[in-house]
């Protein structure tokens, strides 16, 4: 095994995050650890932050090239190299997310080191509670993922493994039958290379994918714009994409626009709301969600309609009654 170490000086304030909800990335003491399989090679990557301005990446693999790629994948996933100064300069005074932006300069979009994982997460999270989706993901990883006995870590099942699985096996993990079939079909597109997600990382495409991959995935029933936009943001690093169909944004934008607690915005309204953030829509959305949960973003207060004004003129009032003590 070859060990490779790289020290990174973040260009913008950085704070190493914790593990992922599905258990693939784990925080063990000061280190964030992740097992990856890249082109058939197993790579174990660890990340520590000994100081605010230093982040250390270490990878062990059978070849130096695999170790270097593992570090590059985790640098992408953590966002350590992202220079977010243009975003903060533009929106620290924003009337909606400004307080959140000023309060937490370390916030970044949490990405996946492999875009296929972001697609799996998006499909399993469609139209169900997040906790239930995470439970499905954990069952899928436990049953079909790749394991390293020495580290105790697991990697996500590769596209080929999911492509070869019967949809009935995926439904046994509590995945809805239609989404199980969609996941199998998506896995076949990725495993065959017809939807080349690796080549789509950073590629300019309206839906957050290279156009060919977008067409392939969107042609699958049960996969729509929300799924590919989540993939674009969390798997391909596209800050300019907002998952406008997200129920959280539909609720937040509806309430911000109307002041009514139960209001719901249309997807087109959500897109229009985030349009002023331009190339930073995705990060603005993350700040809005973070700030809303912490009370830093408040909907306008609704005021009850007042009484109709009285007509002008002299008004006489009856004298106040005397108290019994008088």
Image (tube, rainbow, N blue to C red):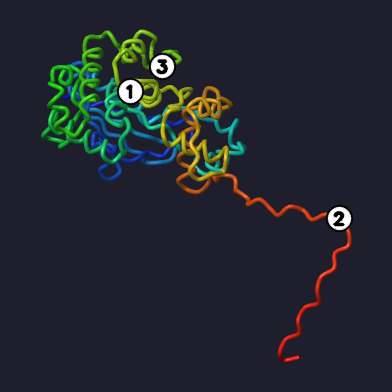
Is residue 277 or residue 87 the one in the foreground? 277
Q: Are marks 3 and 1 in contact (CB under 8 Å)?
A: no
Q: Residue furthest left?
A: 149
Q: In the rendered image, which residue does mark 1 sit on? A: 72
Secondary structure beneath dot 2 equals loop
Which residue corresponds to mark 3?
Answer: 202
> Sequence-wise, which precedes: disc 3 or disc 2?
3
Q: Please report whichever mark, 2 or 1, sits nearer to the chain's N-terminal start.
A: 1
Q: Is residue 106 visible?
A: no
Residue 113 in the image: above or below residue 108:
above
Please rate how many residues cluster around mark 3, counting C-alpha atoms within 10 Å: few if below 14, some from 14 to 19, many from 20. some
User: Which quarter shows the N terminus?
Assistant: top left
Residue at screen point 50% across, 40% down: 263
Name the residue carrying label 2. Answer: 312
- Give the camera-side residue of 199 and 208: 208
Q: Indicate which label's residue lies in the foreground, 3 or 1.
A: 3
Q: CA distance from mark 2 to mark 1?
A: 76 Å
Query: Is 96 on the left-hand or right-hand side of 182?
Result: right
Q: Is residue 176 visible?
A: yes
Residue at 52% in and 37% down: 254
């Amino acid at each position: 095994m070859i060990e490779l170490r790289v020290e990174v000086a973040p260009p913008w304030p950085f704070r190493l995050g914790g593990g992922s909800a599905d258990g693939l990335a784990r925080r063990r003491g000061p280190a964030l650890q992740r097992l990856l399989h890249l082109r058939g090679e197993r790579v174990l990557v660890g990340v520590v932050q000994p100081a605010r301005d230093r982040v250390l990446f270490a990878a062990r693999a059978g070849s130096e090239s695999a170790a270097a790629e593992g570090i590059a994948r985790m640098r992408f996933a953590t966002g350590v190299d992202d220079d977010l100064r243009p975003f903060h300069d533009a929106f620290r005074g924003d009337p909606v997310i400004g307080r959140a932006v000023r309060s937490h300069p370390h916030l970044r979009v949490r990405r996946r080191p492999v875009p296929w994982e972001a697609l799996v997460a998006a499909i399993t999270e469609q139209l169900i509670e997040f906790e239930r989706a995470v439970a499905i993901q954990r069952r899928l990883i436990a049953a079909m993922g790749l394991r390293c006995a020495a580290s105790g870590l697991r990697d996500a099942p590769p596209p080929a493994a999911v492509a070869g699985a019967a949809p009935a096996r995926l439904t046994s993990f509590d995945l809805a039958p239609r989404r199980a079939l969609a996941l199998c079909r998506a896995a076949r597109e990725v495993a065959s290379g017809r939807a080349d997600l690796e080549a789509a990382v950073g590629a300019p495409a309206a839906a957050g994918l290279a156009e060919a991959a977008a067409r392939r995935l969107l042609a699958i029933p049960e996969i729509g714009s929300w799924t590919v936009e989540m993939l674009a943001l969390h798997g391909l690093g596209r800050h300019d994409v907002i998952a406008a169909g997200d129920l959280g944004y539909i609720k937040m934008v509806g309430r911000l626009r109307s002041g009514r607690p139960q209001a719901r915005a249309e997807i087109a309204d959500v897109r229009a709301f985030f349009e002023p953030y331009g190339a930073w829509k995705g990060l603005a959305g993350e700040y809005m969600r973070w700030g809303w949960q912490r009370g830093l973003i408040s909907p306008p207060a609704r005021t009850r309609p007042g009484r109709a004004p009285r007509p002008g003129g002299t008004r006489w009032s009856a004298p106040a009654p005397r108290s019994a003590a008088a």
